[in-house]
Amino acid sequence: MNASSLRISKLDGTNFHAWKFKMQMVLEERDLWEVVSGEIKAEQCETQLDQATYKRKSRKAMAVICLAMEDSQLPLVRSASGACDAWSRLEDHFEKKSLANKLFLRRRFFTTMMEEGDDVLEHINKLKTLAEQLEAVGGSTLESRSDTLSWELVTSRLLHEEMKRKEQGSKGDEASQGQAFITRDNQRKGRPVKKSWPCHNCGKIGHWMAECPSRIQENTERHRPQRAQDSGDRYRSQRANVAQEEDSGDYLFSIGETTSAKSSDIWLVDSGATQHMTCSKKFMRNYKGFDAVDVHLADDGIVQAIGSGDIVMSMKTPQGMKKGVLTNVWHIPKLSRNLFSVGRFTKDVGPVTFTKDGCYGEAKGTKWKIGAREVKGLFKLQMTPVAPEQSNAAKSSGCQGGTKSYLWHLRLGHIGHDGLNCIVTKNIGIGIDISSVKKWDVCEGCALGKQTRVRFQSNTTARTSKLLEVIHSDVCGPMSMATFSGKRYFVTFIDDKSRYC
């Protein structure tokens, strides 16, 4: 008996899955598999003849297995007591049922992709091999529901798709060759491949939901710039104005229709919004931009928030006109209306109640009307945003006794008293509505701008002059992923002089 007579590739450590199946066939053909698989055990042999037969078959099977292995793999079975023990050792070594091995094979299974131009059948066989290896170590491919997907269904669909594309390629449609896994190809010149399942948007067969003409038309109309039409009518928005926060972003859901063109001065009371939102930042203070955050509309449209800031609002209360600040207002340029979030107001200020004619806010025992019912059930906010310059001017006037000199000091970049007086007396400024310059109190901005921070104290600690004289040590852990041996901590030792770890 020699290895060549087996006519199978030797086990080299990388081909155990295929080698295992071939070796099983060889042992089956030589009537030795029942000894290797453990179907017949030594303790089951009652007579001496049966025991002698079992030992002879075990030695013969052991020889067949060892002769089909490379020299580098023989240490795995060299100390085995028999063929059954040798087979179990090989399975334990190459098909170890550990969590790390399961995760490794599952990651390979789900990340294996078909390259352009590859054969579909070869790719399917590769996936089947990975699935069998995963099942051998006790894992699962987590296949989808049996009533919708199965290996047989996926295989037949893919092979059928490949056959159709090959036929189209032979007729001159070169753009569709070798793309068995591409479900949408806008660059093909020939007749597109018909799909056999319905669209989830309109229910018609022949296209995906992302390619649905009705859905594309709706999104185009919604995102079309709002401008005057040739007939003089303005584009009217029919969309939603309620936001609800989700893990994947913020969503806008419809509660009614708006009846006029986009205006940055109109605010609607929104009982579902989680944030105050505005389409214009001209009234915003302390504006801070951030990475775009997707806000999903009810019809699958998407707008983006690109920043946030504060807006000063003027409102009528029982004590007269008061000013308040809406904090953390999101800036969404493509939003059709400004949204006043009831949820945010309730969290920051106080409760809000709705009646037939309007909605009312309450804080510290004071109740006032914040919104009036408009047409089609919408509530319009009865607050007026205050421009930043107006707010700053009022603040400046209050801090400095109402002098316009200090206001022009701020407007002209914190110009000094003598410089401002020179501009006024020589009449070299345009639009400066003061006849004389009055002294103002200490300007906080000027005072802070002329100060310097105390420098950080330099590190005067000297390094050691000898190796291993001082060792810095630290323990890191617990780590989220344990090692193969179950360890979750590691320790570092760093020499102070050499900085070697």
Image (tube, grey):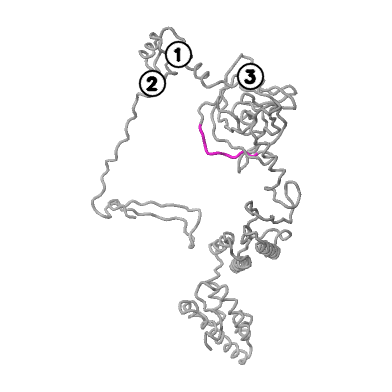
* Residue at the image position 44 percent from the left and 15 percent from the top: 408
Q: x%, y% of residue 143?
A: 66, 60
Query: Which residue occupies the foreground of this view, 313 or 79?
Result: 313
Q: Amino acid at mark 1?
A: Ile
Q: x%, y% of residue 20?
A: 58, 76
Q: What residue is pinned by disc 3? A: 366
Q: What residue is pinned by disc 2? A: 446
Instruction: Report the magenta residues as a range.
Output: 288-296
State if disc 2 and disc 3 touch (CB < 8 Å). no
Q: Residues within 10 Å of mark 1 (few under 14, many from 20)?
A: few
Magenta segment includes 353: no
Q: In which quarter of the view is residue 101 placed?
A: bottom right
Query: Which residue occupies the foreground of this view, 465 or 251?
Result: 251
* Residue at the image position 64 percent from the left and 24 percent from the top: 266
State if disc 3 and disc 1 touch (CB < 8 Å). no
Inter-mark Cα distance, 1 to 3:
46 Å
